[in-house]
Amino acid sequence: MKRTKTFLVGLCVGLMVLGVAASASAGQITIDASQPPYTAAQYAGLGDPTTFPWGWAGTASDNNAIMNMILGPTAPLLPGYTEYYKNEGGGVEEGSLKDSYSGIINGNDATISSTGSPYISTSPYPAYVLVKDGSATPNWYLIKLDGWDGFSDIILDNFFLDWNPAEGNQYGGSISHASLLGKGIAVPEPTSLLLLGFGLVGLAGARRMLRK
């Protein structure tokens, strides 16, 4: 009897661990614009856009001009992509996935978090974050979110703070917009949901057996 109880408790705990592991995210993504490689975009002489290993940066300040370069038919950087979520600060959020994400913009920093499902698919096409300011140089960054799973937090730090060699001063700008771009929408897989359910059942079962 004791061995049976021990086995069942172990099974319940195993189901719990498996379920939680299947539903766990890969952790937050932090992008610090004051650190390499993103500081490379601060130097003068940028084209619009300029290509970097991590994405693109440019000097256009008009939102429509920027989006036409990224998604438009004439010079698309990301053909077939969609701006699924946009945060303009002050509680203004737009896009078809505005109920799946929530953002906070605080000067030169911002955070975008998942609030539910569906979410942006990251397979086989990576997602991107677009960070903009109308008065700094560069005015925008389009950064590939390597390793992002579609729902982990995205932390944006120290954007538009660096010195600009062409002007010899510090703009002291701030983030005006932060957007998430992707090429497809995903929902949790039934298998993952089932394993999570097993995990919850396992947790309840383990607690009951340990009480006896």
Image: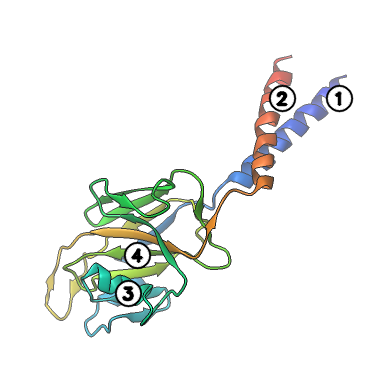
Q: Where does the image place residue 30, in percent across and percent down from the top left?
A: 40, 57
Between 172 and 192, which is closer to the camera in this rendering?
192
- Tag 1, which secondary structure? helix
Q: Is residue 206 positioned above or below 178 on the image?
A: above
Which amino acid type is shown beneath numbered disc 3?
A: Asn
Residue situated in front as seen by the camera: 170 or 102: 102
Disc 2 element: helix
* Circle 2 residues within 10 Å: few <14, some 14–19, many ≥20: some
Q: From the image, tell me which residue sits under label 2.
A: 205
Residue at image location 64% in from the left, 49% down from the top: 189
- Label 4 belongs to which residue? 130
| Cβ–Cβ under 8 Å for marks 4 and 2 | no
Residue in the foreground of this view, choosing between 26 and 35: 26
Numbered-mark total: 4
| Sequence-first tag of 2 and 3 | 3
Rendered position, 6 above or below 59: above
Task: Let me know if residue 36 appears in the view.
Answer: no
The disc, 4 or 1, on the residue closer to the chain's N-terminal end is 1
Q: What residue is pinned by disc 3?
A: 68
Marks 2 and 3 sit apart, C-alpha to C-alpha, by 55 Å
- Give the quadrant of the C terminus: top right
The earlier-in-sequence mark between 4 and 3 is 3
> Circle 3 sits in a helix, a strand or a loop, which is it?
helix
Q: Position of residue 122 (x, y in %)?
A: 53, 62
Q: Secondary structure at mark 4?
A: strand
Amino acid type indicated by mark 1: Arg
Q: CA distance from mark 4 to mark 2?
A: 46 Å
Q: Are marks 2 and 3 in contact (CB under 8 Å)?
A: no
Q: Is residue 144 left or right of residue 193?
A: left
For label 1, the residue is: 3
